[in-house]
Image (cartoon, rainbow, N blue to C red):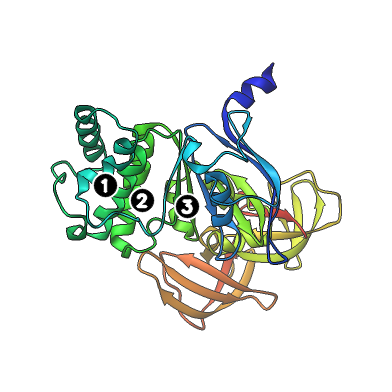
Amino acid sequence: MENKDIQKNYIIDLKNISKTFDDTEVLKDISMYIKRNEFLTLLGPSGCGKTTLLRIVGGFEEPSRGEVYFEGENIINLPPYKRRINTVFQKYALFPHMNVEDNIAFGLHIKKIDKKLIKKKVSEMLELVNLKGFEKRSVDSLSGGQQQRIAIARALINEPEVLLLDEPLGALDLKLRKGMQLELKKIQQKVGITFIYVTHDQEEALTMSDTIAVMNEGRVQQIGSPVDIYNEPKNAFVANFIGESNILEGKMIRDCLVVFHNTHFECVDGGFDEQESIDVVVRPEDIQIVSQEEGMLKGTVESVTFKGVHYEMLVNTGEFLWTIHSTAMSYIGQVVGLIITPADIHIMKRR
């Protein structure tokens, strides 16, 4: 009974999805589910397969193997226009010969919806995307951010249960992109449907997502909340791709005790074999710089770079070159101590 209740919370279930193009396997046996009303981001470098997976969900691409279930029904043979899914592409594909109102209403005109109802729904959509009063504007007169909002309104007016977004902020400048990240999250919360978002931008994923699926070389490396993905990476790829990391080889002595850098450290991780070889992740912002007498480790500052909100320093301890982020600056050549608390040491299985 409990298992059925959990499954009711899924809207999409991907089972053993693989895709091959010209003898190259770009997706490799991916199985994952997507919850109702969540903002899920497919995150990974270019060529990792994230857009191909999105297109398979939308029906624009067929998998070589595997099945796509929507609310328990296999939709693998259902064409895109029959799926309760709409897509916002990176190039917004607005119709230049139509004004804003006609662009948004296009899908409703095709369905021959009553004109009064169309006007009402267009007005509601423009209010949702903060473009009230833009009905008669030419789309060519709009900024990139405004065009993106129109594309979202056009997709949402058909009341899909899932909205797919393929790197829709990629063409915007940095400031506008950051503003639109917050807008998109607000829109998703207002309409209360599932958003599946593709990006290679780690900050974007951390800012907007309820859940992140990190992909590399056609496989899902880790799925979890932004906090879990950042604080508890499953492997070195995830640790390096999501933010910066110091990664060292080590051994678990026993639960909550690890040795790396020829030093024993208490940690909070368990469930490993005694003397098991592991990898240790320590984030740059989790290392405290103190006097050399107070430090657990001692090293020399080799470089200092001002990053705006913090200084990035490289500290050489002889065994390892540490990257450290701190709001207090140390000086090149200065000998400093380093402290790492147990909660800031993250243990990963070695692959």
Specify the quadrant that holds the C terminus: bottom right
The amino acid pointed to by label 1 is: Asn
The amino acid pointed to by label 2 is: Gln
Q: SS at mark 2?
A: helix
- Please indicate, yes or no, whether residue 15 appears anywhere in the rendered image: no
Q: Give the Cα separation between the discs numbered 1 and 2.
A: 23 Å
Check whether the beta carbons of the residues at disc 3 and disc 2 lie within 8 A of each other.
no
Specify the quadrant that holds the N terminus: top right
Q: Mark 3 vs mark 1: which is more N-terminal?
A: 1
User: At 57% across and 27% down in the image, what residue appears?
Assistant: 9
Foreground pick, 10 / 111: 111
Q: Give the Cα separation between the discs numbered 3 and 2.
A: 9 Å
User: At 38% across and 35% down in the image, what residue appears?
Assistant: 189
- Provide the residue designation for mark 1: 103
Foreground pick, 330 / 67: 67
Q: Position of residue 22 (x, y in %)?
A: 69, 67
Q: SS at mark 1?
A: helix
Q: Is residue 214 left or right of residue 124?
A: right
- Provide the residue designation for mark 2: 181
Up the image or down, 111 lies above or below 316; here it is above
- Provide the residue designation for mark 3: 205
Q: Mark 3 vs mark 2: which is more N-terminal?
A: 2
User: At 77% across and 62% down in the image, what residue appears?
Assistant: 250
Q: Pick out the residue farthest to the right.
A: 274
Nearer the observer: mark 3 or 1; the answer is 1
Check whether the beta carbons of the residues at disc 3 and disc 1 lie within 8 A of each other.
no
Q: Position of residue 292 (x, y in %)?
A: 57, 70
Q: Residues within 10 Å of mark 3 (few under 14, many from 20)?
A: many
The amino acid pointed to by label 3 is: Ala
Up the image or down, 66 lies above or below 139; here it is above
Q: Give the Cα separation between the discs numbered 3 and 1.
A: 29 Å
Q: Residues within 10 Å of mark 1 (few under 14, many from 20)?
A: many
